[in-house]
C-alpha cells in the first residue's frame, strides 16, 4: 500500500506541482459537484426533448464524461474535467434535431465528424493557424450568444416566457402556477448559493429545488434511489456518419467544430493560467490536451451524446488545490459512480422547474464574455452584437456564427481595415454566403 501513493506521485508529478493525493482527490470532488448538473440537463435535452432514449443518454453522458476526463488526466496530466458541452447539447437538440428535422443519428454523425476533424487539426498542428485567424471579438460574441440561447431555452421550458401573437413572445400572465413558482424558487436559490460562493451551487440548487418540489407535491418522490445503469444499446454506435457527410450539413459540422475548438482552447488556457501551469505564456502538452478533447468527442458520439468538451468549472477544483491529472481522474470515477443513481435522475430531469434554472444560470455565466468586446469600435461591436442577437432570435447557434463570420470581414473592409482580417476568414465568409444562397437558412 505504501508504494501506491508513491507510484501515483511519480506518475502525476505531485512534487513538481506542489500537491498531494488528498488535495487532488478533494479538487476532483469539488469539480464534479460544480458540473454534476450536466447529468440531469443533458439527458433532459437529448432524451426528453430530442427524442433519444433517456436512460441511454444518461449512461452515454456519464461514461463520455469519464472517458474524456480520464484521457485528460492520464494522457495530458491536467486538472481539467470534460463532459457533454452546454450550448452544444442545446444546439444539437433545438436547432439540428427539432429545428432542421435532422434525425438524431445523423446529428451524432456530424458530432463524430467534427471530433475527427478536430483530431486531424491537432495532429497536423493546423489548429494554431485557425485559432489565430479568428479575431477575439468573434470568439467572445459566440460564447455570449450561446449563453443567451441557453437562457432563452431555460425560460421557454419553464414557461416563464410564452408565445404571443402580437409580440411573438411575452412573460407568462399566470406566474402562480406551481411549476413556475418552483422554477423561480430554484433560480433564486441557485443565485443565492452562487453569490455566497458555495462550490457546486448549480448542482445544490437543483437538489434544493427538487427537495422543495417533493415537499410541495410538484415533484414526484422517487420510489428508489439506486439501480443498475440502464442499457446503452438504444444509442450505442447508432451515429449516421454517411448521412452527415451531405454538403447541406456543412454549417452543422462547422458549428460543432468551431465552438468545441475555441471553447476548449479558452478553457485550457484559462484553467492552466489559474493553476500556474503556463510556461512563458505557452501551454505545455497542449497537443495532448486537445487530442484528449477530440477523442472524447468522438467516443461521446459513438456512445450517444453531443460534443464532449472541457468544462470551465474545472477552475473550482484548481481553486481547491488541484494541479495534476489526478483531479480529472477522481472526477471521472465519480461520473461512473453516478451511473447507479439513475432513478433520481429520471425523476428530477423530467421536471423543467429543476433543470431550467440551471440553463438560465449557465447562460448568465457564458454571457460574461460580452465585457471583453470593444463596443466603441463599430467594426467590432456590430458583428458581435448581431452574432449574439441572432442566436436566440433564430433559435440557431450556427446562424449566429454564420452572420458574424460574414459581417466581420465585410465591415472591416468598409472601415478600411481589410488587412486586419485573416484570409481564412474571407474564405469562410464566402462559404457561409454560398450556404445561405443555395441551401437557405441554417
Image: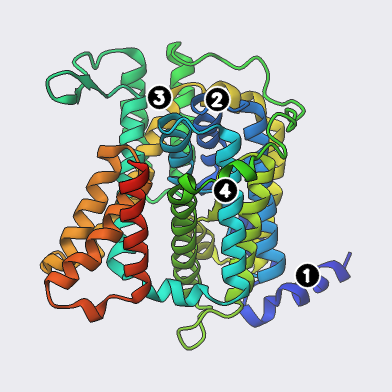
User: Relative to the observer, which residue lies in front, 404 or 62?
Assistant: 404
* Residue located 32% across and 62% down the image: 429
User: Which image quarter holds the C terminus?
Assistant: top left
Label 1 belongs to which residue?
8
> Would you identify the image quadrant in which residue 357 lies?
top left
Spatial CA distance of label 3 from label 2 is 20 Å
How dense is the environment of label 1, judged by Cα within 10 Å: few (below 14), some, or many (20 and up)?
some
Spatial CA distance of label 4 from label 3 is 38 Å
Q: Is residue 43 above or below residue 259?
A: above
User: Relative to the observer, which residue lies in front, 267 or 217?
Assistant: 267
User: Relative to the observer, which residue lies in front, 145 or 344?
Assistant: 145
Residue 31 coordinates in the image, percent (x, y):
55, 54
User: Relative to the observer, which residue lies in front, 411 or 155?
Assistant: 411
Spatial CA distance of label 4 from label 2 is 22 Å
Give the secondary structure at mark 3. helix
> Would you identify the image quadrant in which residue 424 lies?
bottom left
How dense is the environment of label 3, judged by Cα within 10 Å: few (below 14), some, or many (20 and up)?
many
Spatial CA distance of label 1 from label 2 is 43 Å
Label 4 belongs to which residue?
245
Amino acid at each position: 500500500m505504501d508504494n501506491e501513493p508513491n507510484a501515483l506521485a511519480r506518475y502525476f508529478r505531485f512534487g513538481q506541482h506542489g500537491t498531494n493525493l488528498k488535495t487532488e482527490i478533494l479538487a476532483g470532488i469539488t469539480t464534479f459537484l460544480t458540473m454534476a448538473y450536466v447529468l440531469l440537463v443533458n439527458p433532459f435535452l437529448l432524451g426528453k426533448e430530442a427524442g433519444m432514449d433517456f436512460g441511454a443518454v444518461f449512461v452515454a453522458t456519464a461514461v463520455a464524461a469519464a472517458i474524456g476526463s480520464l484521457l485528460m488526466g492520464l494522457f495530458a496530466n491536467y486538472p481539467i474535467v470534460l463532459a457533454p458541452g452546454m450550448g452544444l447539447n442545446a444546439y444539437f437538440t433545438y436547432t439540428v434535431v427539432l429545428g432542421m428535422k435532422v434525425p438524431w443519428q445523423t446529428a451524432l454523425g456530424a458530432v463524430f465528424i467534427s471530433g475527427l476533424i478536430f483530431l486531424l487539426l491537432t495532429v497536423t498542428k493546423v489548429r494554431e493557424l485557425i485559432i489565430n485567424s479568428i479575431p477575439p471579438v468573434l470568439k467572445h460574441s459566440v460564447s455570449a450568444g450561446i449563453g443567451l440561447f441557453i437562457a432563452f431555452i431555460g425560460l421557454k421550458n419553464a414557461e416563464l416566457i410564452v408565445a404571443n401573437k402580437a409580440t411573438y413572445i411575452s412573460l407568462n400572465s399566470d406566474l402562480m402556477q406551481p411549476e413556475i413558482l418552483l422554477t423561480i424558487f430554484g433560480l433564486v436559490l441557485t443565485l443565492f448559493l452562487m453569490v455566497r460562493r458555495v462550490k457546486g451551487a448549480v448542482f445544490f440548487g437543483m437538489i434544493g429545488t427538487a427537495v422543495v418540489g417533493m415537499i410541495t407535491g410538484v415533484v414526484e418522490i422517487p420510489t428508489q434511489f439506486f439501480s443498475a445503469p440502464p442499457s446503452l444499446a438504444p444509442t450505442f454506435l447508432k451515429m449516421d456518419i454517411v448521412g452527415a457527410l451531405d454538403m447541406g450539413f456543412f454549417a452543422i459540422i462547422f458549428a460543432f467544430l468551431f465552438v468545441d475548438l475555441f471553447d476548449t482552447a479558452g478553457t485550457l488556457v484559462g484553467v492552466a493560467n489559474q493553476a500556474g501551469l503556463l510556461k512563458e505564456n505557452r501551454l505545455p502538452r497542449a497537443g495532448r490536451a486537445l487530442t484528449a478533447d477530440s477523442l472524447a468527442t468522438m467516443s461521446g458520439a459513438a456512445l450517444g451524446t453531443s460534443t464532449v468538451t472541457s468544462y470551465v468549472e474545472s477552475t473550482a477544483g484548481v481553486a481547491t488545490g488541484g494541479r495534476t491529472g489526478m483531479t480529472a481522474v477522481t472526477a471521472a470515477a465519480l461520473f461512473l459512480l453516478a451511473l447507479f443513481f439513475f432513478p433520481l435522475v429520471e425523476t428530477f430531469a423530467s421536471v423543467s422547474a429543476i433543470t431550467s434554472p440551471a440553463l438560465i444560470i449557465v447562460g448568465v455565466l457564458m454571457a460574461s464574455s460580452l465585457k471583453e468586446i470593444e463596443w466603441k469600435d463599430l467594426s467590432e461591436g456590430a458583428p458581435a452584437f448581431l452574432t449574439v442577437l441572432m442566436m436566440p432570435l433564430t433559435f440557431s447557434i450556427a446562424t449566429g456564427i454564420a452572420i458574424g463570420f460574414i459581417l466581420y470581414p465585410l465591415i472591416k473592409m468598409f472601415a478600411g481595415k481589410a488587412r486586419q482580417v485573416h484570409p481564412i476568414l474571407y474564405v469562410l465568409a464566402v462559404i457561409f454566403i454560398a450556404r445561405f444562397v443555395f441551401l437557405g437558412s441554417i
